[in-house]
Image (cartoon, helix red, strand yellow):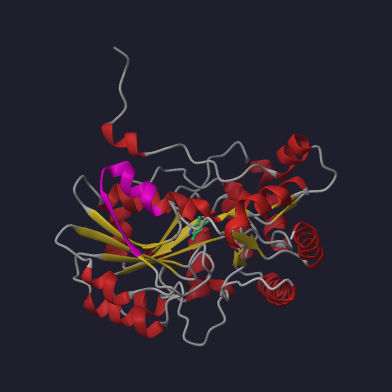
Amino acid sequence: NQIQPRKVLGKIQPYSPGKPIWELQKELNLDKVVKLASNENPIGPSPKGTAAIQSRLNDLHRYPDADTVSIREAIAAKLDVKKEQLIVTNGADELITLLSETFLEEGDEIIVPAPSFSEYDFGANLMGAEIVPIPLDEKYQFDVDKMLAAITDWTKLLYICSPNNPTGTYLGKEDLERILNEVPERVLVVLDGAYSHYATAEDYTEGIEFVKAGAPILVMQTFSKIYGLAGLRVGFGIARESIIQTILKVKEPFNVNSLAQAAAAAAIQDDDHVIASRESNEAGKKQLYEGFEKLGLSYTETMSNFILLQLGPDAERIYQELLRKGVIVRYGKIWGLPEHVRVTIGTKEENDFFLEALTSIL
Ligand code: PMP
């Protein structure tokens, strides 16, 4: 006789993406914990972002700007798009939910690469839409032929995560161009560039040029990664104005709080912090690659701030032992990769701590 939830929620489990450091420290009774599990920026937030927060503290009795004007203006200036082509959300996570609420209903389909970021599936399940996973190939590259062949009359969204979480591989510009040329207009291609600032490949594109050219694409980005503001929850989408206006129909008015808006607007102008974050990531990447090679471990070359590391049949045990030694990485089973872990590239010191722990276990 109890009140019943919607039937589609039967497919959804509450998602808990890793505990905060202090909680694990207490739980495991450890002096030191190094968290390399959530692809956060190890050098911290943009100092310009944190300074901007200070100036807003006395205005906390006011509601935030529902139209997020100053942050849209800052993003528009930085990326050379119109502010009407932008929507700002409570993390990119919220944008994925808004996209689902805007475009999906029961019976619709979304095409997603597999393995990839799990929130796309969540959004589809929430609306009772079907998920059509297209496996990456054996080198974790996108299978463009299969993605295109999977399009049906019911397809609404086609997700591309580039660089892809958790593999670190990416979709080249020519392939994206081909997809955009071949998808029917009624399909929206969503290019998730949460990690786009880390990509160094010459044929990488963050996709904004295609938005400008009027293609059926929405580019999604976040302040949680290179800008180091994961705790504030700010993401944004860039697309044709008519698409943005439609998504705005389902947005809550005050979805991004005022401190987050101030910090993000300042952080996007903080080139020094972006450059320093990229340099730290490149150095850490090299350090981890060398460490893995010394240990005879294979890994997937990454265009991002994390590395998919192959540990073989003992991966789960190694993951657990790392935890006991105070190193948190992400175990690959959630992506159907039970022999892998995904490790975020940390500071030199964090990477050393992780490599030492790994060496002592192997
Ligand atoms: N997309 C990808 C690929 C991600 O890895 C993440 C964060 N883990 C997000 C989107 C969501 O980012 P945000 O913190 O802005 O919600």
- Farthest-out residue, bottom: 202
Q: Quadrant of residue 31?
A: top right
Question: In the picture shown, does residue 23 fall above or below 279?
Answer: above
Picture coordinates of residue 82, whole percent (x, y): 40, 70
Residue drawn at 72 percent across, 59 percent down:
44
Residue 35 appears in the rendering: yes
Front position in the image: 358 or 115: 358
Q: Is residue 187 magenta?
A: no
- Whether residue 23 sits left or right of residue 249 in the image: it is right
Instruction: Say if 40 sits above or below 269 in the image.
Output: above
Percent x, y of residue 274: 66, 71
The residue at the far left in this view is 153
Q: Residue furthest front?
A: 313
Q: Is residue 121 magenta?
A: yes
What residue range appears in magenta?
Answer: 120-134
Q: The N terminus appears in which quarter of the rendering?
A: top left
Percent from the top left, x then y, of residue 205?
Answer: 45, 79
- Residue 83 at x, y percent in the picture: 42, 66
Return the residue nearer the eye: 245 or 343: 343
Q: Is residue 31 left or right of residue 55?
A: right
Q: Is residue 63 above or below residue 111?
A: above
Tell me what residue is drawn at x 47 percent, y 55 percent.
335
Q: How many marks?
A: 0
Quadrant in the picture for the C terminus: bottom right
The residue positioned farthest toward the top in the image shown: 1
